[in-house]
Amino acid sequence: MKKLFTLTALAAVTTVVTCAHGQDFPGKDKVITIVVPFAAGGPTDRVARDVAEAMRKPLGGVSIVIDNAAGAGSTIGNAKVARARNDGYTLLLTHVGMATTPVLYRKLPYNYETDFEYLGMINDVPMTLIGKPQLESSNFKDLRDWIGKNGTKVNLGNAGIGSASHLCGLLFQSEMKVEMTTVPYKGTAPAIADLLGGQIDLLCDQTTNTTSQIEAKKVKPYAVTTLKRLATPVLKDIPTLDESGMKNFQVTIWHGLYAPKGTPPAVLKTINDALKVALKDPEFIKKEEGLGAVVVTDKRIEPIEHKKFVQAEVARFGPVIKAAGVYAD
Ligand code: ASP
């Protein structure tokens, strides 16, 4: 009995000490919200839900919910987090758009370098060029001829200016030397629904969204956007754009986790530690690999390295996007 009392008393003291250092995060009965700046059911949403599930345990079983603040190629959700309370209970999970939107938008309601704390990178994800099931073209060569004949009549979906599908579509049009009609959505979940219904013709989207549709033969897969073919069984026979005549065509995108600027360092460390545990979770890795994604194991998992990587991406995409001459206000 005496021993029990001693342990309880010690536990109480420990709690007080950790609170004093701001390390009581996440608090009991609190909820962490991860803002996803694209529609529910799409690839960014999927990564967010899977990583949230894997981070829950290392964060003491805390509830993590997803808030799909979709629209304007991710800038609405990004702005929401830039303005949110910086207490660690609101986070942002987004993709390459963190680096493309600063180049594409003349004015943004946030600064990608100074309004966020960088928590770390999650994965690298290839993309696939897919077509509606009604398309007659059975391979990339036929598709190329069909696009050549139809030009602006071809409807190419995307998830808004600055999204990965927009970036991939820009590069594809520039390689094809054909301007198609682009149709923006709030994410590629609604875009793929319209592709299945035949309302749009083509979409370039992450493998994390297209693999199951390709496996079920619901869409026509024409190419992957990596230089080498992918290892994932469902995707391994799909040719690369490079081997199909578009030399050096390569678009691999990524996802990262962020918090509003000024979130306390101890809270950021707790979240980054949990993210590192999640990225080693065999269940999470299996899900990602099955969908063609590669979970990050290199130094980009460190906040400072991820920030450097995003800055380098901004520098890399700047000239490409400027050459395409596309801007949004
Ligand atoms: N795949 C989308 C994009 O093109 C984003 C999404 O819906 O998650 O950027």
Image (cartoon, helix red, strand yellow):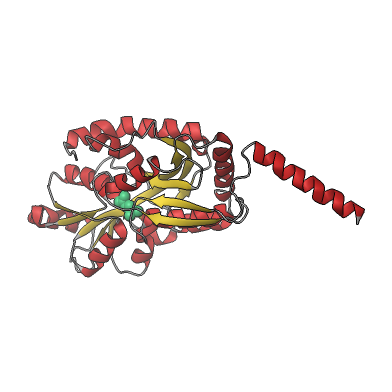
Q: Nearer the viewer, residue 254 or 175?
A: 254
Q: Quarter of the image for the N terminus: give it.
A: bottom right
> Percent position (x, y) of residue 177?
13, 43
Judged from this view, the residue extending furthest toward the right is 2
> Percent position (x, y) of residue 306?
46, 35
The answer to whether residue 109 is left or right of residue 45 is left
Q: Is residue 239 visible?
A: no
Residue at x-position 34% and y-position 65%: 213
> Percent position (x, y) of residue 39?
33, 57
Residue at x-position 55% and y-position 34%: 265
> Percent position (x, y) of residue 30?
55, 53
Q: Can residue 28 be seen in this view?
A: yes
Quarter of the image for residue 261 reads: top left
Q: Nearer the viewer, residue 78 or 165?
A: 78
Q: How many marks?
A: 0
Residue at x-position 43% and y-position 60%: 233
Vertical relation: 246 (above or below) 49? above
